[in-house]
Amino acid sequence: MTERLDTVAFDADDTLWHNERFFRLTQARFAELLATHAETADLDTRLLAAERRNLGRYGFGVKGFTLSMIETAIEVTDGRVPAGVISELLAAGRDMLDHPIELLPHARAAVEALAGRYRVMLITKGDLLHQERKLAQSGLGDLFDAVEIVSEKTPEVYARIFTRHGAGAEAALMVGNSLKSDVIPPILAGGWGVHVPHGQTWAIEHAEAPVEHARFRALPDLARLPDLVEWIDGA
């Protein structure tokens, strides 16, 4: 007999709405702009390395990605990157920030089905202003009892959030597309982690699924989430 669920929390990017594909499109344009200076594979490797270095400085999101592209462009051109290329990269970053929100299939239905029956939360990381803007544009904001925008998702962060807003991690379930950020840390905090994979996942978010853990579940999409939550709550 498991403890009854009190809280169901959702990740935002690539769980409720599309996100990573816009990074991929911008990265493809980045490769085109610097095609005379580096092969695409080498450029991708250098950009990923820059992103890893800069996470502690810039955090997650479009702004850090844009700065990492500029840093990589300077690096691969030995400081001779044309001003026009820098201008295009800045414009690409602005376009990403302004891109309309497109909900993923079953996102609204899943949140609506659980709202009112559980404390429904959004827990996401990234740039505060951009995440707030995306939530407002999504039309889902009124369905959430609480929203937490954090700089990192660790077991300690989840434990604090679930204690602050509910009955603790043991009575909470987190659903998201990232095993590293959305599934493993809440399980380590004592809660449930539900993985709903997305077709495109940032390399930094890759991790092995904790398939042997009793509080791990995986679903092909959000359509089956309400039934899974009901089953867990009644087990």
Image (spheres, grey):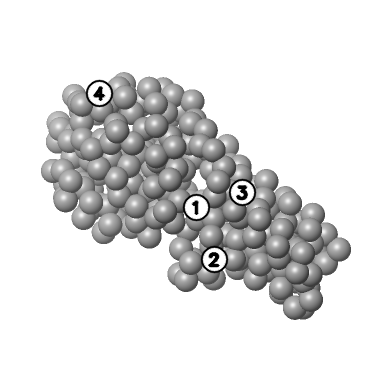
Is there CB contact under 8 Å for labels 4 and 3?
no
Give the percent coordinates (x, y) of residue 34. 79, 62
Residue wearing tag 2: 52
Residue wearing tag 3: 95
Is there CB contact under 8 Å for labels 4 and 1?
no
Residue 122 shows up from this direction? yes
Residue 1 lies in quadrant: top left
Residue wearing tag 1: 205
Of helix, strand and loop, which one carries label 2? helix
Q: Name which residue type carries label 4.
A: Glu
Q: Is residue 150 above or below residue 141?
A: below
Give the percent coordinates (x, y) of residue 77. 78, 73
Q: Is residue 32 above or below residue 220?
A: below
In three-dimensional space, the C-alpha distance between marks 4 and 3, rounded to whole angstroms, equals 40 Å
Give left or right: position of 162 versus 215.
left
Of helix, strand and loop, which one carries label 3? helix
Task: Indicate which label's residue lies in the foreground, 4 or 3.
Answer: 3
In three-dimensional space, the C-alpha distance between marks 2 and 3, rounded to whole angstroms, equals 23 Å
Give the percent coordinates (x, y) of residue 149. 34, 52
In three-dimensional space, the C-alpha distance between marks 4 and 2, rounded to whole angstroms, equals 39 Å
Name the mark on residue 230. Answer: 4
Q: Name which residue type carries label 3.
A: Asp
- Looking at marks 4 and 1 on the same chain, the residue that comes earlier in the sequence is marked by 1
Of helix, strand and loop, which one carries label 4? helix
Give the percent coordinates (x, y) of residue 35. 83, 59
